[in-house]
Image (cartoon, helix red, strand yellow):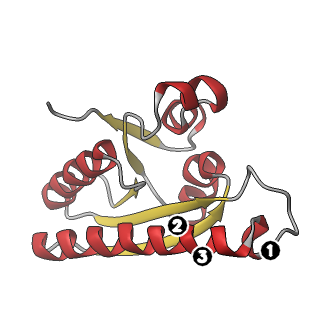
Amino acid sequence: MYEHILIPLDGSRNSKQALEEAISLAKKFDSKLSLLTVINNTNFYYGAGAAGMPPSMYDDQKKMADKILSDAKKYVDEQGVSYETSADVGNPKNIIAHIYPDQHGIDLIVIGKSGVDALNRLLIGSTTAYVVRNATTKVLVVNTKD
């Protein structure tokens, strides 16, 4: 039913829960997973440095993205599921909803409910809400189990 599942990861509890759900689906349908983290450079002026942000900030964000993917890879390796990883730079909403799925033949996005706090959701909007409204493929939203 699902051949290629995208899991956007931001290190939040909700994204970890989404990864668990995606692994369960991948085992059930013999799917390949795409583990994706996006370095958001949309809040900075282009030309400021690597990826449109101050170089030191980009380096910090890259290290964080690499750590998120490294942790996810270890977990997925233990589960015996096929996967690929990617750390992209740009607008997370657009990359997750449109660019990555279109370029990689994704047929399901499994995403955590929200990785940002209420104030950021109010000011900039939830990436999850945007993906649900605008994705080019099916979306499964996973809420954290308490």
Q: Amino acid at mark 2?
A: His
Foreground residue among 73 and 4:
73
Foreground residue among 54 and 31:
54
**In the shown orientation, is residue 56 left or right of residue 54?**
left
Q: In x, y percent, where is residue 116?
A: 47, 37
Query: Which residue does the image show at 37% across and 66% down from the upper left?
Result: 68
Mark 3 element type: helix
**2 or 3: tag closer to the N-terminus:** 3
How far apart, in angstroms, are the residues tagged by discs 2 and 3? 26 Å
Q: Amino acid at mark 1?
A: Gly
How far apart, in angstroms, are the residues tagged by discs 1 and 3? 10 Å
Residue denoted by label 1: 49
Residue denoted by label 3: 59
**2 or 1: tag closer to the N-terminus:** 1
The mark tally for this picture is: 3
Residue denoted by label 2: 104
**In the shown orientation, is residue 2 left or right of residue 74?**
right
Q: In x, y percent, where is residue 12?
A: 35, 48
Mark 1 element type: loop
